[in-house]
Image (spheres, rainbow, N blue to C red):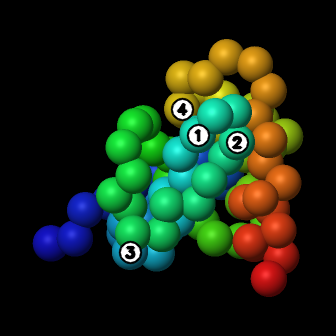
Amino acid sequence: MEPVRTCIGCRARAPRSSLLRVVAQDSHLVADVAAVRPGRGAWLHPTLDCFRLAERRRAFGRALRVGGMLDTSELENRLNG
């Protein structure tokens, strides 16, 4: 049985393999494709809709327990293609 995680954007539960792990690194939000980077991670569907929902709800800072603003431009560019 595959592990299940919750998307911080839409709050839907999904298998780990269908979600993208993101971590905070030096106040930048970085995609962790291999899911092996150290530190606290958050899970997100790899779609712009879920990204925008998480951004609007300010879910990245809460899920990653980071105070202040996070630079999400790198992750947004990755999701745009």
N-terminal of the pair, mark 1 or mark 3, is 3
Task: Identify the residue at horizontal 84%, vertical 54% (top origin).
Answer: 73
Task: Identify the residue at horizontal 70%, vertical 42% (top origin).
Answer: 28
Q: Position of residue 50 (x, y in %)?
A: 72, 60
- Residue situated furthest front in the rendering: 26
Classify 10 Å Cα crowding around label 2: few (below 14), some (14-19), many (20 and above): some
- Number of numbered discs present? 4
Task: Identify the residue at horizontal 25%, vertical 62% (top origin).
Answer: 3
Q: Quadrant of residue 64?
A: top right
What residue sits right under mark 2 in the picture? 28
Q: CA distance from mark 2 to mark 1?
A: 5 Å
Depicted 7 relative to depicted 62: above or below? below
Q: Position of residue 68 (x, y in %)?
A: 75, 19
Q: CA distance from mark 4 to mark 3?
A: 20 Å
What residue sits right under mark 3 in the picture? 17
N-terminal of the pair, mark 1 or mark 4, is 1
Q: From the viewer's perspective, is the residue at label 3 or at label 2 nearer? A: 2
Q: CA distance from mark 4 to mark 2?
A: 11 Å
Q: Position of 46 compared to 70: left or right?
A: left
